[in-house]
Amino acid sequence: MAKVRLLVDSDIIIDYLKGIKQAQELFRSTEIILYCSILSKKELLSKPGLNTSERKKIIRLLNRLKVLKVDEDILAKYTLLVNQYGENHDFFADYIIAATAWAK
């Protein structure tokens, strides 16, 4: 049986780090290949007040995921979303993550 590919947002990664049971079960699953956007990685590692041990824990977790960079297909889907819903800087990361899920 083929594994499910799932793009997780930074909120799910944060839930895992906080010990939320459902997020931890998701990360333990052998049936799911987890991905995240490069923007989620940036968001997690640039959080103000992050100490060295927290940063290392995040990096170790991100190393278990496939981090997806923005490519031409994602950019094209992002452009379609902006054209449909309007350009809003508050939703830039959300549009990129939605475009990433759509493209991949």
Image (cartoon, helix red, strand yellow):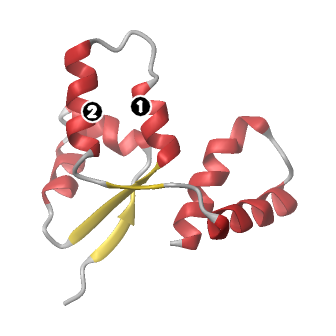
Label pair 1/2, CB-CB below 8 angstroms: yes
**Is 40 in front, or is 56?**
56
**Is 54 in front, or is 21?**
54
Q: In the picture, which quadrant includes the N terminus?
A: bottom left
Answer with left or right where residue 94 lies relative to residue 57.
Answer: right
**Mark count:** 2
Residue 30 to residue 49: above or below:
below
The residue carrying mark 2 is 58
Q: Position of residue 73 (x, y in %)?
A: 64, 70
Tell me the residue at 40%/27% (across/down): 45
**Amino acid at dot 2:** Ile
The residues bearing labels 1 and 2 have C-alpha atoms spaced at a distance of: 7 Å
Which image quadrant for residue 76? bottom right
**Amino acid at dot 1:** Leu
Tell me the residue at 79%/66% (across/down): 80
Residue 44 to residue 100: above or below:
above
Q: Dot 1, how many residues are within 10 Å of its Cα: few (below 14), some (14-19), or many (20+)? A: some
Which image quadrant for residue 18? top left
- The extreme bottom residue here reads 1
Q: Position of residue 64 (x, y in %)?
A: 22, 51
Tell me the residue at 84%/63% (across/down): 84
Secondary structure of the residue carrying numbered label 2: helix
The residue carrying mark 1 is 44
Which image quadrant for residue 90? top right
Q: Position of residue 4 (x, y in %)?
A: 30, 76
